[in-house]
Image (cartoon, rainbow, N blue to C red):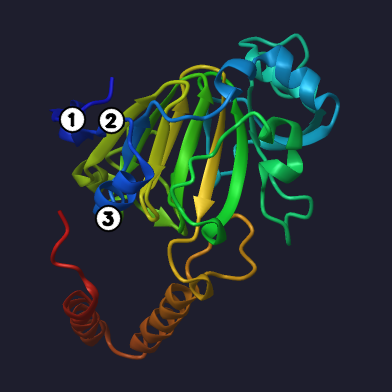
């Protein structure tokens, strides 16, 4: 289980267990925990009736036949980069019962296929996910920890996962609480400072199988320090913005992610309904860098290499932090 301390996993990747704290007040969170910018599991939070009410039967009756769009995968490791899943639509009550099964009499791809629901807004291009709008009956059952100002709220994403489902490694640009309402999850996390070892494609890492990575393909991954915790019903994991996370549902489970804007509102892309687009200044900087690299192609290889290294040194000098702990 989670706790403080450090252990070593096979292949020598360092692992630190995420700190678990009980009875954390809003004041303590904001003054002591939040400024550290590290994940922490909050125990004993007052979450309302959801942790006892949200059974398969209750969810089926509460939502009924409302249609939901879901991810369906024939394999446990769902990968957004390779798109090894399909989208399908099912009545919610049918979906939740299938998601709770290990083997299915009715299925799309295979008898042991995995299901994943990530709630979205009515118009995914314009509307954010908000449990109060998409699932108002369920919203009455859950009490979201008010550890941020109301105007900072961005979205509340309702999630349901089959047992054994593993989601791709990625980061989000906003702080969030992962509220594990029912079931158990294992979460592996990686610090933003280890991004250089994670083989990024946009906001996602190419390394999906963090337990048995292909080190011939991803040799630097072993250098990334892994933080890990196991969430049980009623646990709340604080995931700071830019921290990579890879999640395995050890059981069928229901969760709610609550995202909030910790930067000034103008920093974020106004067209971002998922909360995963880089801040506008970061996007502009990357575009400028791409243009600079394109310009370097005008030089012979020896010169291109030399000036590229000078650019890296300048970025390190001007932009890198020296106080990462």
Q: Residue at x 27, y 39 (%)?
A: 215
* Label 1 element class: loop
Residue 35 circle label: 3
**Front disc: 1 or 3:** 3
- Disc 2 or 1, which lies upstream in sequence? 1
Residue position for label 1: 4
298 above or below 77?
below
Question: What is the x, y in percent for residue 80?
Answer: 55, 44
Residue 20 circle label: 2
Q: Quadrant of residue 307?
A: bottom left
Pointer 2 with pointer 1, Cβ within 8 A? yes
Question: What is the x, y in percent for residue 185?
Answer: 44, 25
Callout 2: 10 Å neighbours few (<14), some, many (20+)? some
Compare residues 33 and 102 and report the one nearer the observer.
33
Looking at this view, name the residue that lies furthest to the right: 65
Pointer 3 with pointer 2, Cβ within 8 A? no
Residue 194 is left or right of residue 241, and the answer is left
Callout 3: 10 Å neighbours few (<14), some, many (20+)? few
């Amino acid at each position: 289980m989670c706790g403080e301390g450090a252990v070593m996993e096979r292949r020598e990747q360092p692992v630190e267990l995420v700190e678990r704290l009980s009875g954390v007040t809003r004041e303590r969170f904001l003054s002591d925990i939040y400024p550290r910018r590290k994940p922490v599991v909050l125990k004993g939070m007052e979450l309302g009736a959801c942790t006892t009410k949200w059974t398969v039967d209750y969810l089926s009756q509460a939502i009924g036949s409302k249609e939901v769009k879901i991810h369906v995968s024939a394999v446990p490791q769902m990968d957004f980069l390779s798109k090894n899943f399909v989208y399908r639509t099912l009545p919610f009550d049918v979906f939740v019962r299938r998601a709770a099964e290990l083997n299915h009499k009715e299925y799309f791809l295979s008898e042991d296929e995995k299901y994943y629901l990530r709630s979205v807004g009515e118009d995914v291009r314009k509307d954010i996910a908000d449990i109060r709008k998409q699932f108002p009956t369920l919203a009455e059952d859950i009490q979201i920890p008010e550890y941020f100002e109301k105007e900072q709220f961005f979205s509340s994403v309702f999630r349901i996962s089959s047992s054994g489902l593993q989601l791709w490694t990625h980061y989000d640009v906003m702080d969030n609480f992962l509220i594990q309402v029912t079931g158990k999850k294992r979460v592996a996390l990686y610090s933003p400072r280890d991004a250089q070892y994670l083989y990024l494609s946009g906001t996602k890492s190419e390394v999906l199988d963090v337990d048995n990575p292909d080190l011939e393909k991803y040799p630097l991954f072993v250098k990334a320090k892994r933080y890990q915790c196991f969430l049980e019903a009623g646990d709340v994991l604080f995931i700071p913005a830019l921290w990579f996370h890879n999640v395995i549902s050890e059981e069928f489970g229901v969760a709610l992610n609550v995202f909030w804007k910790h930067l000034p509102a103008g920093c974020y892309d106004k067209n971002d309904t998922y909360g995963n687009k880089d801040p506008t200044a970061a996007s502009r900087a990357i575009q400028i860098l791409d243009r600079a690299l394109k310009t370097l192609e005008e030089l012979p290889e020896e010169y291109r290499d030399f000036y590229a290294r000078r650019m890296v040194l300048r970025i390190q000098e001007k932009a890198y932090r020296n106080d990462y702990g």
